[in-house]
Image (spheres, rainbow, N blue to C red):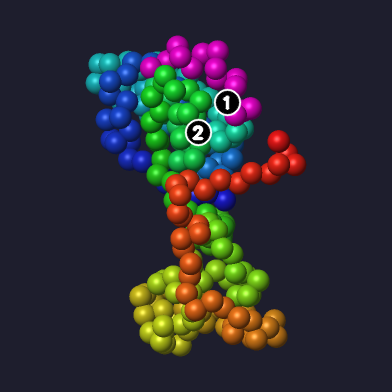
C-alpha cells in the first residue's frame, strides 16, 4: 500500500489562509489503512481547521468528503456538481490521487494535506515499513522475495558491500543487512544458485527515462 504522514497543522493553515470555503477530501484506499486520510481523519482535520480559523476571527466553511479512491475517474464524478462552488480542495489522499484530482478539476486549486511516503506493508499495528520502490525491473524471483533495492540500505544490486557485521548493516544497528536476508532466504528455499543469476548492476534507465511511466492494457480499453 501507499503510506503517508499528516502535514503539520501549521503548514496546512498556511496553505488554506487565502480561502474561506474549501473541501476536505479523504480516500478510502491506502491512506485509510495507515490512518492518515480516511473518513475519521477528514472529520478530525476539518474540525481542527474550523476551530483554528474561528479562534483567529476568520470562520472557514468546509465540506467533508471521502471518496472510494481519488486516483480513478469514476470516483471523482460525484464531486463534479459542486467542486467549483468551493475555492480549493484540501486532499488527504496520496500524491497520485491529489495530482489526478488536479487534472480532472483544472479550475480548482488542490492542496496536499499529507506527505506521501512509500510502498509498504503493515508490520504490526501502527507500524509500516517500505518494501518496494516501483523500480520497474522486478527480480524478486531471484532474491527469495526480498527486494535488494529497498531492503539494502545502499540499494546495492550486486550483493553485499562487506560493511555488515553479524547480519546487521553498518548504517545502523536497527537495520538488518538486506543481502544477508536474501542469502538466508535463498538457502532456506534451496535456491542459492539464483544468486549467480543476478545482474551485475541495476539498469535504472528503462524505469525512468521519458517522463512518467504508463501501463496500457489493450484488453481492458
Query: Which residue matches tag 2?
Result: 100
Q: Quadrant of residue 171?
A: bottom left
- The disc placed on residue 209 is none
The structure residue drawn at horizontal position 60% and vertical position 33%, both measured from the top left corner, is 72
Q: Residue furthest front?
A: 210
Compared with 78, 92 (above or below) is below
Under circle 1, the secondary element is: helix
The structure residue drawn at horizontal position 60% and vertical position 20%, both measured from the top left corner, is 78
Do the numbered discs 1 and 2 sit on residues whose CB atoms are within 8 Å? yes
Q: Position of residue 10 (x, y in %)?
A: 28, 35
The structure residue drawn at horizontal position 60% and vertical position 81%, both measured from the top left corner, is 197
- Image quadrant holding the C terminus, namely top right
Q: Is residue 74 magenta?
A: yes
Q: Main secondary structure of the magenta part?
A: helix
Q: Which residues are magenta?
A: 73-87
- Left or right: residue 194 compared with residue 61: right
Seen from the viewer's position, the closer of residues 96 and 116 is 96
- Left or right: residue 111 compared with residue 134: left
Query: Which residue matches tag 1?
Result: 76
Seen from the viewer's position, the closer of residues 170 and 84 is 84
Q: Quadrant of residue 144?
A: bottom right
Q: Label 2: how many residues lie within 10 Å, few (<14), some (14-19) or many (20+)?
A: some
Amino acid at each position: 500500500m501507499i503510506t503517508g504522514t499528516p502535514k503539520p497543522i501549521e503548514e496546512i493553515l498556511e496553505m488554506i489562509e487565502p480561502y474561506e470555503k474549501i473541501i476536505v477530501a479523504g480516500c478510502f484506499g491506502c491512506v485509510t489503512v495507515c490512518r492518515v486520510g480516511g473518513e475519521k481523519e477528514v472529520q478530525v482535520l476539518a474540525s481542527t481547521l474550523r476551530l483554528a480559523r474561528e479562534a483567529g476571527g476568520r470562520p472557514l466553511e468546509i465540506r467533508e468528503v471521502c471518496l472510494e479512491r481519488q486516483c480513478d475517474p469514476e470516483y471523482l464524478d460525484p464531486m463534479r456538481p459542486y467542486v467549483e462552488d468551493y475555492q480549493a480542495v484540501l486532499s488527504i489522499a496520496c500524491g497520485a490521487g491529489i495530482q489526478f484530482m488536479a487534472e480532472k478539476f483544472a479550475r480548482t486549486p488542490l492542496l496536499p494535506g499529507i506527505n506521501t511516503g512509500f510502498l509498504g506493508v503493515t508490520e504490526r499495528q501502527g507500524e509500516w515499513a517500505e518494501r518496494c520502490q516501483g523500480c520497474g525491473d522486478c527480480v524478486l524471483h531471484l532474491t527469495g522475495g526480498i527486494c535488494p533495492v529497498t531492503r539494502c540500505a545502499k540499494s546495492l544490486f550486486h550483493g553485499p558491500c562487506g560493511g555488515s557485521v553479524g547480519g546487521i548493516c553498518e548504517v545502523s544497528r536497527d537495520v538488518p543487512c538486506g543481502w544477508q536476508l536474501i542469502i538466508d532466504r535463498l538457502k532456506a528455499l534451496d535456491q542459492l544458485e539464483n544468486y549467480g543469476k543476478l545482474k551485475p548492476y541495476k539498469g535504472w534507465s528503462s524505469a525512468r527515462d521519458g517522463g512518467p511511466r504508463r501501463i496500457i492494457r489493450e484488453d481492458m480499453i
